[in-house]
Image (cartoon, rainbow, N blue to C red):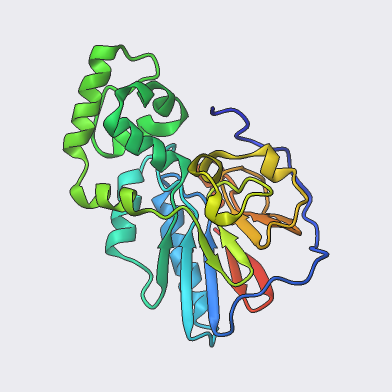
Amino acid sequence: MFKGLFRKSERSAVPARRAAKLPDGLRIYAIGDIHGRLDLLTQMHETIRADAAQSGAPHRRVVYLGDYIDRGLESRQVVDYLLDEPLEGFEPVYLMGNHEQVLLQFLEDPGVGPNWFFFGGDATLYSYRVSGASPAIDAARLAKVQTGFQNALPPRHLAFYRALAYQHRAGDYLFVHAGIKPGVPAERQSETDLLWIRDEFLDSTADHGAVVVHGHTIAPEPVVRPNRIGIDTGAYASGKLTALVLEGAERRFLHT
């Protein structure tokens, strides 16, 4: 379930198809996987503010591609920051990541806990001041950790996690967390594929009907293909959080 996290370094290629575009007057900043790195998120917000000041686009939108939590030690603080200090003058779009999905599952089913703790959930619980999380935990202690988290989770955080969207379409771009299943229309994509898919999507050369902007799979640099753009640069470990800037037919990247 959790295999295939890392991909070998990929060389970016220039798309050969007609250039994808956004509607006139719209600029989008898409931010990759944050994973509890509040320091990088605040830095990126400052970079975006400065960058946007140079734009005449009347409508500005910021799309977060999911995985706000886990691995980094400030997951709770990341959510507080997004709720309390949103980018002024920007329309925010918050997408669901596979890590948020597992958090919600753990609230209902403690049995997912050991897998979640193994791939970073222990750091999230630490940020909520819930102790005892371990991949080797026994059933009795696991139930206590679940109850502790249920009690520690602020209602507004639960509402945030539950309200996360699975995809967002703008012009010729489709924004998702992990990718899409090739050959399946966007409206029929499964939650599992949108949050977890890897090789079937990453290796596909199919025309998806939109350029898919995604995170989920780490690469040292943004990966640009004719049918997709991947912007997960492993911020929690690398210190490099990436944002894709889109306006008209132009695209470029910002990094911490």
Q: Residue at x 27, y 62 (%)?
A: 84
Residue at 37% over, 34% down: 123
Give whichever of 141, 53 is nearer the camera: 141
Relative to 177, does residue 134 appear above or below in the rendering? Answer: above
Could you tell me if residue 82 is visible in this image? Answer: yes
Give the position of the N terminus as an image quadrant: top right
Please state the horizontal and vertical placement of residue 28, each as a whole percent of the image. Answer: 53, 71
Picture coordinates of residue 205 (x, y %)?
78, 50
Which part of the image, by quadrant, shows the C terminus? bottom right
In-image side of 14 versus 189 (left or right): right
Q: Is residue 29 found left or right of 183 in the rendered image?
A: left
Residue 243 visible from this viewpoint = no
Q: Position of residue 237 (x, y in %)?
A: 53, 40
Q: Residue at x 39, y 26 (%)?
A: 117
Residue furthest to the right: 16
Is residue 128 rendered to the left or right of residue 204?
A: left
- The answer to whether 157 is drawn above or below residue 226 in the figure is above
